[in-house]
Amino acid sequence: MFIIRNANIYAPRALGLRDIVIQDEQILMLAEPGVTVGDLPYEEYDAAGRAVSPGFIDNHVHVLGGGGGLGFRSRVPELQTSQLTRVGTTGVIGMLGFDQSTKNMRALVGKTKAFNEDGMSAWALTGATLRHPIPTLTGDVIDDIAFIDDIIGVGEISVSELGYGYDSLGSGPAYIAEMLVQSLLVGRLAGKGGVLCLQVPPYFEQCLKPMMAMLDTSRVPIEQLVPSHVNQTDMYMSDAMEWGRRGGWVDVGANYRPDNHYERSTDPAIAVTEMLEAGIDGAQILISSDGNGAPPKEEKGEAVPTRANYGKVSSLHMVWKQLIDQDRCSVEQALRFVTSNVAIAYRLPNKGKVQEGMDADLIVFDENWTPVTVIARGKFMVKEDEIIVRSMFEKDVLEGIG
Ligand SMILES: [Zn+2]
Protein backbone atom coordinates (compact mmCIF):
# COMPACT_ATOMS: atom_id res chain seq x y z
CA MET A 1 0.00 0.00 0.00
CA PHE A 2 1.18 3.49 -0.88
CA ILE A 3 -0.49 6.74 0.18
CA ILE A 4 0.10 10.10 -1.45
CA ARG A 5 -0.87 12.70 1.11
CA ASN A 6 -2.33 16.15 0.47
CA ALA A 7 -2.64 15.99 -3.30
CA ASN A 8 -4.43 18.90 -4.96
CA ILE A 9 -6.03 16.71 -7.57
CA TYR A 10 -6.77 17.60 -11.18
CA ALA A 11 -8.39 14.36 -12.29
CA PRO A 12 -8.41 16.25 -14.89
CA ARG A 13 -11.43 17.76 -13.09
CA ALA A 14 -10.34 19.81 -10.07
CA LEU A 15 -11.22 17.76 -6.98
CA GLY A 16 -9.33 19.72 -4.33
CA LEU A 17 -7.19 18.23 -1.58
CA ARG A 18 -7.25 14.43 -1.23
CA ASP A 19 -5.10 11.52 -0.14
CA ILE A 20 -4.55 8.97 -2.90
CA VAL A 21 -4.43 5.37 -1.68
CA ILE A 22 -2.62 3.11 -4.14
CA GLN A 23 -2.55 -0.67 -4.03
CA ASP A 24 -0.10 -2.38 -6.37
CA GLU A 25 -0.49 -0.52 -9.66
CA GLN A 26 -3.91 1.02 -9.17
CA ILE A 27 -5.70 3.76 -7.30
CA LEU A 28 -7.70 2.08 -4.54
CA MET A 29 -9.41 5.25 -3.37
CA LEU A 30 -9.34 9.01 -3.14
CA ALA A 31 -9.91 9.92 0.49
CA GLU A 32 -10.15 12.95 2.74
CA PRO A 33 -6.67 14.03 3.89
CA GLY A 34 -5.44 12.05 6.88
CA VAL A 35 -6.94 8.73 5.83
CA THR A 36 -5.75 5.68 7.78
CA VAL A 37 -5.52 2.11 6.52
CA GLY A 38 -5.57 0.30 9.88
CA ASP A 39 -2.57 -1.86 10.67
CA LEU A 40 -1.65 -2.46 7.05
CA PRO A 41 1.94 -1.52 6.22
CA TYR A 42 2.19 1.38 3.85
CA GLU A 43 4.63 3.78 2.24
CA GLU A 44 3.85 7.50 2.32
CA TYR A 45 4.68 10.48 0.15
CA ASP A 46 3.59 14.02 0.97
CA ALA A 47 2.49 16.03 -2.06
CA ALA A 48 2.20 19.00 0.35
CA GLY A 49 -0.77 20.58 -1.38
CA ARG A 50 0.85 20.59 -4.81
CA ALA A 51 -1.15 19.90 -7.96
CA VAL A 52 -1.40 16.24 -8.99
CA SER A 53 -2.66 15.14 -12.41
CA PRO A 54 -2.82 11.93 -14.45
CA GLY A 55 0.45 11.07 -16.22
CA PHE A 56 0.60 12.39 -19.77
CA ILE A 57 0.04 9.96 -22.65
CA ASP A 58 2.01 10.88 -25.77
CA ASN A 59 0.07 9.30 -28.63
CA HIS A 60 2.65 9.70 -31.40
CA VAL A 61 6.30 8.90 -30.69
CA HIS A 62 9.04 7.29 -32.76
CA VAL A 63 10.35 5.29 -29.84
CA LEU A 64 12.89 3.35 -31.91
CA GLY A 65 14.12 6.58 -33.45
CA GLY A 66 12.79 7.96 -36.70
CA GLY A 67 14.80 9.82 -39.27
CA GLY A 68 16.84 8.04 -41.92
CA GLY A 69 15.99 10.48 -44.69
CA LEU A 70 19.56 11.80 -44.89
CA GLY A 71 21.48 8.56 -45.06
CA PHE A 72 22.10 5.81 -42.58
CA ARG A 73 23.80 8.16 -40.17
CA SER A 74 20.58 10.17 -39.88
CA ARG A 75 18.87 7.26 -38.11
CA VAL A 76 17.73 8.61 -34.73
CA PRO A 77 18.73 6.54 -31.63
CA GLU A 78 16.19 4.75 -29.44
CA LEU A 79 14.35 6.80 -26.86
CA GLN A 80 15.24 6.19 -23.21
CA THR A 81 12.67 5.86 -20.43
CA SER A 82 13.59 8.93 -18.42
CA GLN A 83 13.40 11.16 -21.51
CA LEU A 84 9.65 10.58 -21.27
CA THR A 85 9.07 10.34 -17.52
CA ARG A 86 11.06 13.44 -16.58
CA VAL A 87 8.53 15.53 -18.54
CA GLY A 88 5.54 13.73 -17.04
CA THR A 89 4.86 11.22 -19.82
CA THR A 90 3.96 7.87 -18.29
CA GLY A 91 2.19 6.42 -21.34
CA VAL A 92 3.47 6.28 -24.89
CA ILE A 93 2.15 5.03 -28.22
CA GLY A 94 5.09 4.10 -30.41
CA MET A 95 5.26 3.61 -34.15
CA LEU A 96 7.67 3.18 -37.02
CA GLY A 97 8.11 6.13 -39.34
CA PHE A 98 9.88 6.89 -42.57
CA ASP A 99 12.59 4.24 -42.15
CA GLN A 100 11.00 0.81 -42.30
CA SER A 101 14.13 -0.80 -43.76
CA THR A 102 16.53 -0.69 -40.82
CA LYS A 103 13.76 -0.37 -38.18
CA ASN A 104 11.02 -2.95 -38.05
CA MET A 105 8.00 -4.22 -36.13
CA ARG A 106 10.00 -6.80 -34.17
CA ALA A 107 12.24 -4.10 -32.76
CA LEU A 108 9.24 -1.83 -32.13
CA VAL A 109 7.36 -4.47 -30.15
CA GLY A 110 10.56 -5.26 -28.24
CA LYS A 111 11.02 -1.59 -27.38
CA THR A 112 7.38 -1.38 -26.27
CA LYS A 113 7.91 -4.31 -23.92
CA ALA A 114 11.06 -2.65 -22.55
CA PHE A 115 9.12 0.49 -21.58
CA ASN A 116 6.53 -1.69 -19.87
CA GLU A 117 9.26 -3.58 -18.00
CA ASP A 118 10.62 -0.24 -16.80
CA GLY A 119 7.21 0.51 -15.28
CA MET A 120 5.73 2.82 -17.90
CA SER A 121 2.74 1.97 -20.09
CA ALA A 122 3.53 1.59 -23.76
CA TRP A 123 1.66 0.44 -26.81
CA ALA A 124 2.59 0.04 -30.47
CA LEU A 125 0.87 0.62 -33.77
CA THR A 126 1.54 -1.71 -36.69
CA GLY A 127 2.74 -0.26 -39.99
CA ALA A 128 5.09 2.43 -41.26
CA THR A 129 4.55 5.80 -42.87
CA LEU A 130 5.30 5.38 -46.53
CA ARG A 131 4.58 1.84 -47.67
CA HIS A 132 1.30 0.43 -48.96
CA PRO A 133 0.83 -2.36 -48.05
CA ILE A 134 2.23 -1.64 -44.61
CA PRO A 135 4.85 -3.81 -42.93
CA THR A 136 3.53 -5.84 -39.98
CA LEU A 137 4.95 -8.18 -37.34
CA THR A 138 3.10 -11.37 -38.26
CA GLY A 139 2.56 -10.60 -41.95
CA ASP A 140 -1.04 -9.59 -41.33
CA VAL A 141 -2.62 -6.54 -39.67
CA ILE A 142 -5.46 -8.61 -38.25
CA ASP A 143 -3.11 -11.14 -36.63
CA ASP A 144 -0.91 -8.37 -35.22
CA ILE A 145 -3.85 -6.79 -33.40
CA ALA A 146 -5.54 -10.07 -32.49
CA PHE A 147 -2.52 -11.82 -31.00
CA ILE A 148 0.13 -9.28 -30.02
CA ASP A 149 -0.89 -7.63 -26.75
CA ASP A 150 1.34 -4.59 -27.35
CA ILE A 151 -0.20 -3.72 -30.74
CA ILE A 152 -3.44 -1.76 -30.39
CA GLY A 153 -3.93 -0.21 -33.83
CA VAL A 154 -2.38 0.85 -37.11
CA GLY A 155 -0.03 3.69 -37.99
CA GLU A 156 1.59 5.95 -38.75
CA ILE A 157 0.39 5.57 -42.36
CA SER A 158 0.40 8.17 -45.10
CA VAL A 159 -2.92 8.64 -46.88
CA SER A 160 -0.89 9.01 -50.07
CA GLU A 161 0.41 5.78 -51.55
CA LEU A 162 3.24 7.95 -52.94
CA GLY A 163 4.34 9.06 -49.49
CA TYR A 164 4.01 12.24 -47.51
CA GLY A 165 5.66 14.44 -50.13
CA TYR A 166 2.94 13.89 -52.74
CA ASP A 167 -0.79 13.92 -53.27
CA SER A 168 -2.54 10.58 -53.69
CA LEU A 169 -3.18 9.08 -57.11
CA GLY A 170 -6.40 7.68 -55.71
CA SER A 171 -5.64 4.26 -54.23
CA GLY A 172 -4.28 5.67 -50.94
CA PRO A 173 -7.62 6.52 -49.33
CA ALA A 174 -9.08 3.17 -50.43
CA TYR A 175 -6.15 1.36 -48.84
CA ILE A 176 -6.57 3.34 -45.62
CA ALA A 177 -10.26 2.40 -45.60
CA GLU A 178 -9.37 -1.27 -45.90
CA MET A 179 -6.86 -1.03 -43.03
CA LEU A 180 -9.38 0.91 -40.95
CA VAL A 181 -12.08 -1.70 -41.31
CA GLN A 182 -9.70 -4.59 -40.65
CA SER A 183 -8.33 -2.98 -37.49
CA LEU A 184 -11.78 -1.87 -36.32
CA LEU A 185 -13.22 -5.36 -36.66
CA VAL A 186 -10.30 -7.26 -35.13
CA GLY A 187 -10.21 -4.63 -32.37
CA ARG A 188 -13.68 -5.79 -31.35
CA LEU A 189 -12.36 -9.35 -31.08
CA ALA A 190 -9.24 -8.40 -29.16
CA GLY A 191 -10.79 -5.70 -26.96
CA LYS A 192 -8.67 -2.95 -28.49
CA GLY A 193 -9.46 0.34 -30.18
CA GLY A 194 -8.01 -0.60 -33.57
CA VAL A 195 -7.49 3.11 -34.23
CA LEU A 196 -5.39 4.32 -37.17
CA CYS A 197 -2.85 7.15 -36.92
CA LEU A 198 -2.90 9.03 -40.20
CA GLN A 199 -0.11 10.97 -41.85
CA VAL A 200 -1.36 13.56 -44.31
CA PRO A 201 0.73 15.23 -47.04
CA PRO A 202 0.35 18.74 -45.66
CA TYR A 203 1.74 20.85 -48.50
CA PHE A 204 -0.70 19.97 -51.27
CA GLU A 205 -4.30 20.65 -52.15
CA GLN A 206 -5.76 17.30 -51.16
CA CYS A 207 -4.91 17.20 -47.45
CA LEU A 208 -7.83 15.48 -45.68
CA LYS A 209 -10.34 15.86 -48.53
CA PRO A 210 -9.82 12.35 -49.99
CA MET A 211 -10.35 10.90 -46.51
CA MET A 212 -13.57 12.86 -46.03
CA ALA A 213 -14.81 11.59 -49.39
CA MET A 214 -13.86 8.05 -48.37
CA LEU A 215 -15.77 8.38 -45.09
CA ASP A 216 -18.81 9.76 -46.93
CA THR A 217 -18.81 6.74 -49.24
CA SER A 218 -17.85 4.00 -46.82
CA ARG A 219 -19.54 5.25 -43.63
CA VAL A 220 -16.54 4.03 -41.62
CA PRO A 221 -16.76 5.78 -38.23
CA ILE A 222 -14.61 8.92 -38.25
CA GLU A 223 -13.42 8.32 -34.69
CA GLN A 224 -11.36 5.32 -35.88
CA LEU A 225 -8.88 7.76 -37.41
CA VAL A 226 -6.47 10.15 -35.76
CA PRO A 227 -5.03 12.66 -38.28
CA SER A 228 -1.70 13.66 -36.81
CA HIS A 229 0.03 17.05 -36.49
CA VAL A 230 -2.86 18.94 -38.09
CA ASN A 231 -1.23 22.32 -37.42
CA GLN A 232 1.56 21.63 -39.92
CA THR A 233 0.18 23.98 -42.60
CA ASP A 234 -2.80 26.32 -43.02
CA MET A 235 -4.38 24.04 -45.61
CA TYR A 236 -4.18 21.06 -43.31
CA MET A 237 -5.51 23.12 -40.38
CA SER A 238 -8.52 24.28 -42.35
CA ASP A 239 -9.34 20.70 -43.38
CA ALA A 240 -8.85 19.61 -39.78
CA MET A 241 -11.43 22.21 -38.70
CA GLU A 242 -13.93 20.58 -41.05
CA TRP A 243 -12.83 17.15 -39.77
CA GLY A 244 -13.44 18.35 -36.21
CA ARG A 245 -16.87 19.73 -37.13
CA ARG A 246 -17.71 16.25 -38.42
CA GLY A 247 -16.86 14.85 -34.98
CA GLY A 248 -13.35 13.52 -35.70
CA TRP A 249 -10.24 13.67 -33.52
CA VAL A 250 -7.75 16.42 -34.25
CA ASP A 251 -4.20 15.82 -33.05
CA VAL A 252 -2.02 18.91 -32.71
CA GLY A 253 1.74 18.36 -33.17
CA ALA A 254 3.78 19.96 -30.39
CA ASN A 255 6.99 20.04 -32.43
CA TYR A 256 5.39 21.77 -35.43
CA ARG A 257 6.06 25.37 -34.52
CA PRO A 258 7.29 28.39 -36.48
CA ASP A 259 10.03 28.76 -33.83
CA ASN A 260 11.09 25.15 -34.46
CA HIS A 261 11.86 25.31 -38.19
CA TYR A 262 8.28 24.75 -39.40
CA GLU A 263 7.55 28.16 -40.86
CA ARG A 264 4.21 27.18 -42.34
CA SER A 265 2.84 25.67 -39.16
CA THR A 266 0.43 27.27 -36.72
CA ASP A 267 1.99 27.45 -33.27
CA PRO A 268 0.37 24.49 -31.42
CA ALA A 269 -0.94 26.57 -28.49
CA ILE A 270 -2.53 28.99 -30.98
CA ALA A 271 -3.88 26.05 -33.03
CA VAL A 272 -5.72 24.74 -29.96
CA THR A 273 -7.24 28.18 -29.34
CA GLU A 274 -8.29 28.51 -32.99
CA MET A 275 -10.00 25.12 -32.89
CA LEU A 276 -11.88 25.90 -29.70
CA GLU A 277 -12.91 29.27 -31.15
CA ALA A 278 -14.08 27.54 -34.33
CA GLY A 279 -16.47 25.53 -32.18
CA ILE A 280 -14.61 22.23 -32.11
CA ASP A 281 -15.40 20.38 -28.91
CA GLY A 282 -12.40 20.31 -26.57
CA ALA A 283 -13.19 16.61 -26.04
CA GLN A 284 -11.95 15.93 -29.61
CA ILE A 285 -8.59 17.68 -29.31
CA LEU A 286 -5.37 15.74 -28.67
CA ILE A 287 -1.76 16.88 -28.51
CA SER A 288 1.20 14.64 -29.31
CA SER A 289 4.91 15.25 -29.81
CA ASP A 290 5.70 13.17 -32.92
CA GLY A 291 8.92 13.08 -30.95
CA ASN A 292 12.23 11.29 -31.51
CA GLY A 293 11.78 11.56 -35.25
CA ALA A 294 13.62 13.86 -37.61
CA PRO A 295 11.48 15.25 -40.44
CA PRO A 296 12.99 17.89 -42.76
CA LYS A 297 13.31 21.50 -41.65
CA GLU A 298 11.56 24.25 -43.55
CA GLU A 299 13.32 27.31 -44.88
CA LYS A 300 11.78 30.15 -46.88
CA GLY A 301 8.47 28.29 -47.04
CA GLU A 302 9.94 25.07 -48.42
CA ALA A 303 10.73 21.74 -46.79
CA VAL A 304 14.47 21.25 -47.09
CA PRO A 305 15.10 17.53 -47.52
CA THR A 306 18.78 17.98 -46.70
CA ARG A 307 18.17 19.44 -43.22
CA ALA A 308 16.73 17.08 -40.60
CA ASN A 309 15.05 18.50 -37.51
CA TYR A 310 15.07 16.40 -34.35
CA GLY A 311 11.69 16.42 -32.57
CA LYS A 312 11.85 16.47 -28.80
CA VAL A 313 9.39 14.47 -26.69
CA SER A 314 9.64 17.23 -24.08
CA SER A 315 7.69 19.51 -26.43
CA LEU A 316 4.46 17.85 -25.25
CA HIS A 317 4.84 19.26 -21.74
CA MET A 318 6.20 22.54 -23.09
CA VAL A 319 3.13 23.19 -25.25
CA TRP A 320 0.78 22.01 -22.53
CA LYS A 321 2.34 24.50 -20.10
CA GLN A 322 2.06 27.29 -22.69
CA LEU A 323 -1.71 26.70 -22.85
CA ILE A 324 -1.90 27.47 -19.14
CA ASP A 325 0.78 30.18 -18.94
CA GLN A 326 -0.81 32.04 -21.85
CA ASP A 327 -4.31 31.69 -20.36
CA ARG A 328 -5.55 29.85 -23.43
CA CYS A 329 -7.48 27.30 -21.42
CA SER A 330 -8.01 26.09 -17.89
CA VAL A 331 -5.70 23.53 -16.32
CA GLU A 332 -8.52 21.00 -16.46
CA GLN A 333 -9.13 21.61 -20.16
CA ALA A 334 -5.44 21.52 -21.08
CA LEU A 335 -4.94 18.27 -19.18
CA ARG A 336 -7.67 16.52 -21.14
CA PHE A 337 -5.73 16.98 -24.42
CA VAL A 338 -2.83 14.90 -23.08
CA THR A 339 -4.59 12.50 -20.68
CA SER A 340 -8.26 11.52 -20.74
CA ASN A 341 -8.95 12.46 -24.38
CA VAL A 342 -6.04 10.28 -25.51
CA ALA A 343 -7.25 7.36 -23.38
CA ILE A 344 -10.70 7.66 -24.98
CA ALA A 345 -9.37 8.10 -28.54
CA TYR A 346 -7.12 5.03 -28.39
CA ARG A 347 -9.43 3.10 -25.99
CA LEU A 348 -6.83 2.66 -23.27
CA PRO A 349 -8.63 1.15 -20.30
CA ASN A 350 -7.72 2.38 -16.80
CA LYS A 351 -5.78 5.34 -18.19
CA GLY A 352 -5.99 9.12 -18.27
CA LYS A 353 -7.79 9.87 -15.00
CA VAL A 354 -7.06 10.14 -11.29
CA GLN A 355 -9.93 8.00 -10.13
CA GLU A 356 -10.61 4.85 -8.15
CA GLY A 357 -9.77 1.74 -10.18
CA MET A 358 -7.54 3.63 -12.60
CA ASP A 359 -3.82 2.94 -12.95
CA ALA A 360 -1.73 5.04 -10.59
CA ASP A 361 0.02 7.15 -13.25
CA LEU A 362 0.53 10.54 -11.62
CA ILE A 363 2.42 13.79 -11.93
CA VAL A 364 3.14 16.06 -8.96
CA PHE A 365 3.84 19.61 -10.18
CA ASP A 366 5.66 22.54 -8.68
CA GLU A 367 3.96 25.95 -8.67
CA ASN A 368 5.16 26.58 -12.25
CA TRP A 369 3.56 23.42 -13.63
CA THR A 370 6.87 21.61 -13.99
CA PRO A 371 6.78 17.92 -12.99
CA VAL A 372 8.80 17.23 -9.83
CA THR A 373 7.56 13.73 -9.06
CA VAL A 374 6.25 11.21 -11.57
CA ILE A 375 4.64 7.92 -10.62
CA ALA A 376 3.85 5.20 -13.15
CA ARG A 377 1.72 2.19 -12.25
CA GLY A 378 2.22 2.93 -8.56
CA LYS A 379 6.04 3.27 -8.65
CA PHE A 380 8.25 6.35 -8.50
CA MET A 381 9.88 7.10 -11.84
CA VAL A 382 10.99 10.58 -10.76
CA LYS A 383 10.95 11.69 -7.10
CA GLU A 384 11.53 15.34 -6.15
CA ASP A 385 13.49 15.93 -9.37
CA GLU A 386 15.62 12.83 -8.92
CA ILE A 387 15.31 10.26 -11.68
CA ILE A 388 14.62 6.92 -10.01
CA VAL A 389 14.07 4.67 -13.05
CA ARG A 390 16.08 4.77 -16.25
CA SER A 391 16.37 2.41 -19.18
CA MET A 392 18.89 -0.26 -18.18
CA PHE A 393 21.91 1.17 -19.99
CA GLU A 394 20.76 4.78 -20.28
CA LYS A 395 23.19 6.17 -17.71
CA ASP A 396 26.13 4.05 -18.88
CA VAL A 397 25.74 5.39 -22.38
CA LEU A 398 25.42 9.00 -21.21
CA GLU A 399 28.44 8.71 -18.90
CA GLY A 400 30.40 6.98 -21.64
CA ILE A 401 29.74 9.94 -23.91
CA GLY A 402 30.14 12.60 -21.22
ZN1 LIG B 1 5.51 10.68 -36.89
Image (tube, rainbow, N blue to C red):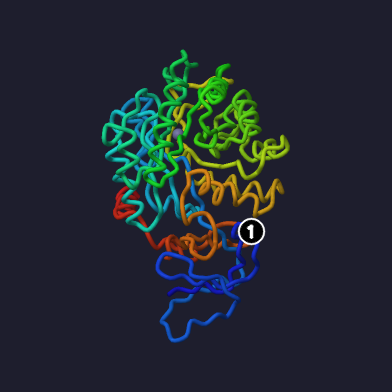
* Horizontal side of residue 25 vs 239, given as left or right: left
Q: Position of residue 141 (x, y in %)?
A: 34, 33
Name above or below for residue 68 compared with residue 93.
above
In depth, the one of 381 and 206 nearer the eye is 206
Q: Quadrant of residue 95?
A: top left
Q: Residue at x 29, y 28 (%)?
A: 101
| Three-letter amino acid code at the position of disc 1 | Arg
SS at mark 1? loop
> Number of numbered discs present?
1
Q: Residue at x 47, y 63 (%)?
A: 360
Q: Position of residue 343 (x, y in %)?
A: 51, 49
Q: Is mark 1 within 8 Å of ligand 1?
A: no
In depth, the one of 118 and 298 nearer the eye is 118
Point out the quarter of the image occupied by ligand 1: top left
Residue at the far bottom in the pictured view: 39
Which residue is denoted by mark 1 in the rendering? Answer: 13
Name above or below for residue 206 compared with residue 263.
above
- Say which quadrant the N terminus sits in: bottom left
Q: Position of residue 158 (x, y in %)?
A: 45, 26
